[in-house]
Image (spheres, grey):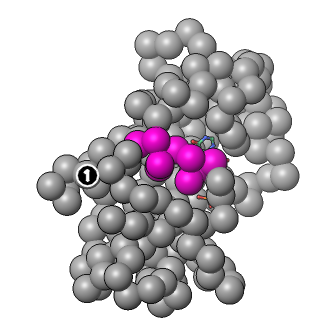
Amino acid sequence: MRLLLASRNENKLRELRAALPEWEVELLDAPDEPAEDGETFLENARIKARHGRAHAAQGDWVAGEDSGIEVDALGGRPGVHSARWAEDGVARLLAELEDVEDRRVRYVCELVVVSPGGAEIAVRGELEGAVATAPRGDEGFGYDPIFLPLGESRTVAELGNGWKAQHSHRARAARALADALA
Ligand code: IMP
């Protein structure tokens, strides 16, 4: 079955492909992008999924994904604003957490999938961790160089794309999706 991801993000495509080996996952080629003005990851994922549905072929499944990080010491920020929070979110986060002891953080991924018939399934995946004091590693993307998963001494960028395919918030959401569809 073919699943079209309503996104232009190749990193998300790579991770969803790795986590959903039984699906043919492609990026959806839509002429425009909807305004991501939801107040939660779920709302934004739904906005992207419904916009994608309108531009996809009838027989295809469509997915909208929204994700980001929630930092406990910042009251859950940047949250839904993770992408537009700053040009360089990593530097801003390190600066805001300078001398802050509580470094707990979680990655959140909400995935909304719309079937060819229009039925919606929403699933969520989370990854708990701590914000490192300096960036390390060069795989993954975004905040991965400063994200230390709980129980790991290496950052997600050091653990790499193979690790992410098994353990990331996106991989967990994808597994929940596979379970929901089974
Ligand atoms: P979106 O593309 O609007 O969902 O924005 C996602 C934001 O969260 C971007 O700033 C990403 O850098 C960040 N983000 C989401 N998932 C990940 C991940 O797996 N690794 C690193 N950063 C991520």
When the figure is inspected, residue 161 is found, relative to residue 172, above or below; the finding is: above
Query: Which residue carries the number 1 mark?
Result: 178
Residue 31 falls left or right of residue 28:
right
Q: Is residue 78 visible?
A: no
Give the residue displayed 83% in from the left and 45% down from the top.
Answer: 88
When the figure is inspected, residue 113 is found, relative to residue 82, above or below; the finding is: below
- Secondary structure type for disc 1: helix
Q: Which residues are magenta?
A: 11-19
Q: Which percent across, then down, holds residue 146?
A: 68, 27
Which quadrant would the C terminus be assigned to in this image?
A: bottom left
Q: Which percent across, then down, holds residue 30?
A: 62, 81
Q: Quadrant of residue 145?
A: top right
Q: Quadrant of residue 10?
A: bottom right
When the figure is inspected, residue 133 is found, relative to residue 13, above or below; the finding is: above
In the image, residue 140 lies in the stretch drawn in magenta:
no
Q: Nearer the viewer, residue 17 or 67?
A: 17
